[in-house]
Amino acid sequence: MTGTTLSDRAVVRLSGDDVRGFLQGLVTNDVSGALPVWAGLLTAQGKALFDFILWADGEDVLIDCEAGQADALIRRLSLYRLRRQIAIARDESLAVHWALQADAPEDPRLGGLGHRWIAPPGEPATGWHAHRLSLGVAEGAAELGQDKTLWLECNAAELGGVSFTKGCYVGQENTARMNWRQKVNRRLAVVRVDADPGEAAMAWYPALGLAVMRLRVEALAATPGVILPAWLADAVA
């Protein structure tokens, strides 16, 4: 059987006193309803710090996040915990799994990304990274840029990563203002490149010939090699 474990992801478990209510006031998406959802934890200015997918496990919430950022995310969330009786820790017994076809939920960002689920770890998956980038979807600290990129510039509205009706969360004021004004001047995009793009790129993957760049909207269509999927083309039309 082909491996399905995404070895660059980790699972963080939140358990205790009203963990959904705790997250509801922090993250960009509505966690009061059905999960999974994609969401971000932002700066007060609305810039991305962490992105993740939230899953329900009974009364607990599981965070499907970058393995390399899991400890930093735990520390950040712990700052907001104050006196709430909430435990926030890695769950090493679980892993994030992915397959193009599986009896599991579709990725909440985009159905074409495939299916995703949480289960004990197994053999590593192959092909996820290239598949995700081929659909123009950026994720993680390297591609989104911690404290560098506004959440709506990360294509959060198009990929279901923000609720404009849920109420306050960290960074909500600037995010809501940008949406109300329909003023997103730059977008993250995946671009095919033949050589190192240098500082023009947020992240570069030479083995794939791809880079993630933060481009002005008016320059998107004219950028050589840009991957412009329908969901992004419609947003910037």
Image: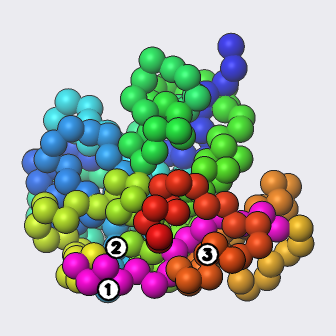
Magenta-drawn segment: 180-193
The numbered mark at residue 42 is 2
Q: How is the image coloured?
A: rainbow
The numbered mark at residue 220 is 3
Task: Work out whether 91 lies above or below 168.
Answer: above
Between circles 1 and 3, the one closer to the viewer is 3
**Local SS, label 2:** strand
Q: Residue at x 83, y 60 (%)?
A: 209
* Identity, as a three-letter code, of the amino acid under mark 1: Gln
**Where residue 122 sits: x, y (%)?**
60, 24
Do tag 2 and tag 3 residues touch (Cβ < 8 Å)?
Answer: no
- Dot 2, how many residues are within 10 Å of its Cα: few (below 14), some (14-19), or many (20+)? many
In-image side of 170 versus 132 (left or right)? left
Do tag 2 and tag 1 residues touch (Cβ < 8 Å)?
Answer: yes
Sequence-earlier tag: 2 or 3: 2
Inter-mark Cα distance, 2 to 1 = 8 Å
Sequence-earlier tag: 1 or 3: 1
Extreme residue in the front direction:
237
The numbered mark at residue 108 is none
Task: Work out whether 76 lies above or below 174.
Answer: above
Q: Residue at x 13, y 61 (%)?
A: 166
Which quadrant of the figure has residue 28? bottom left
Which quadrant of the figure has residue 161? bottom left
**Where residue 148 sits: x, y (%)?**
50, 83
**Where residue 200 sits: x, y (%)?**
71, 83
Q: Residue at x 20, y 30 (%)?
A: 58
